[in-house]
Amino acid sequence: MFTQLAALTGARPGDRVLDVGCGTGYLTRRLAPLVAPGGEIIGVDPAPQMIGYARRHAPPNCSYRVGEGQALDLPDESCDAVVAGDPG
């Protein structure tokens, strides 16, 4: 299911994708190869323990932030795609 969702984003090499509510980062790790080379995945989740897990398992082009989707520290229109929610 997550692999299909990643493909549906239309993410391509060089893209920057935001995953709101990333949890453990599973979807971000599925997206990472789609945006390589040169792309970046940013995961945001309010739970520090989830972000900690995601960081420990992250490929080099993934970064994670503790935060909420309503208050992101990102410039407007700085991402090529945004994913949110649990597809399961």
Image (tube, rainbow, N blue to C red):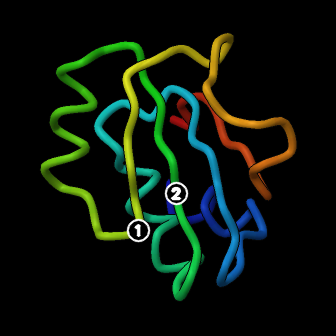
Based on the displayed image, in which of its 4 quarters is residue 52 positioned?
A: top left
Q: Which secondary structure, mark 2?
A: strand
The residue indicated by pointer 1 is: 61
Q: Which secondary structure, mark 1?
A: loop
Q: Residue at x 27, y 31 (%)?
A: 51
The relative height of residue 66 versus residue 43 in the rendered view (above or below) is: above
Q: Earlier in the sequence, mark 2 or mark 1?
A: 2
Dots 2, 1 in contact, CB < 8 A: yes
Based on the displayed image, in which of its 4 quarters is residue 19 positioned?
A: top right
Name the side, left or right, on which 21 lies relative to 72. Answer: left
State the residue in front, 23 or 73: 73
State the residue in front, 79 or 20: 79
The relative height of residue 82 versus residue 1 in the rendered view (above or below) is: above
Return the x and y of residue 14 as percentages of the image width and height. 66, 79
The relative height of residue 31 versus residue 71 in the rendered view (above or below) is: below
Q: Residue at x 56, y 82 (%)?
A: 38
Return the x and y of residue 20 as percentages of the image width and height. 58, 31
Q: Residue at x 65, y 84 (%)?
A: 13
The residue indicated by pointer 2 is: 41
Alpha carbon of mark 2 to alpha carbon of mark 1: how far? 6 Å
Q: Give amino acid for label 2.
A: Ile
Q: Residues within 10 Å of mark 2 (few under 14, many from 20)?
A: many
Q: Residue at x 47, y 31 (%)?
A: 44
Q: Give amino acid for label 1.
A: Asn
Name the side, left or right, on which 8 lies relative to 22. Answer: right
